[in-house]
Amino acid sequence: MGLRQFWRNYKVLIVMGTSLGLIHLGWYNLKGNPLLQKNREQYIPEPGIVAFVSPPAAAPPLPPAAAPPKTKIVNMKPQSWLRRNWLLAAGGAFVSIHLATWILQRVMKSSVRSEVAQKEKTDDKKIF
């Protein structure tokens, strides 16, 4: 199997694999670039969101009959696996679609080659 035959057989896989590798290499280079990251000295944290304000100290407590009804505390639903791992799911879908396309291409190519070979055999028999 020569280099030309290897390229013809695995062209899609070679191009897809190298492009995926180059994309990830570029992403990690950007992520690790010190020019795009803030120094800890320059980082100014934003103030947190106030979730509870205490009542004023001088306010008298309400009588028990006039107290507002207590509401139920509703717990948040746990996030689904897909929401937590959406990037993994998208990457898996991307790779599986391209792999399935490549497999279909190979099957169709071999099917066409076998049909052409059968036609050539029948043509050769008709000539003699």
Image (spheres, grey):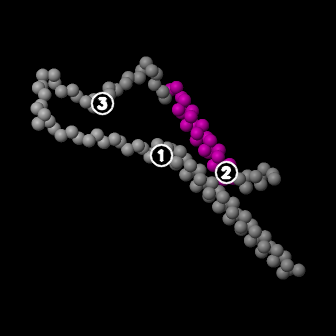
The disc label shown at residue 13, or none = 2
Place of residue 98 in the rendered image (x, y in percent of width and height, measured from the top left): 60, 54
Does the magenta-highlighted stretch encompass residue 28? yes
Q: Helix, strand or loop at disc 2?
A: helix
- The residue pinned by badge 1 equals 81
Place of residue 32 in the rendered image (x, y in percent of width and height, measured from the top left): 54, 29
The span shown in magenta is 11-35
Mark earlier in primary sequence (1, 2): 2
Mark earlier in primary sequence (2, 3): 2
Q: Quick check: 121 above or below 59?
A: below
Q: Nearer the viewer, mark 2 or mark 3?
A: 3
Q: Is residue 47 left or right of residue 105?
A: left
Q: Amino acid at mark 3?
A: Ile
Classify the position of the C terminus by image quarter.
bottom right
Q: Nearer the viewer, mark 1 or mark 3?
A: 1
- The residue pinned by badge 3 equals 49
Task: Give the class, few, some or many, for how many residues have Cα within 10 Å of label 3's Cα (few <14, many ≥20).
Answer: few
**Residue at point 48%, 27% (across, down):** 37
Q: Amino acid at mark 2?
A: Leu
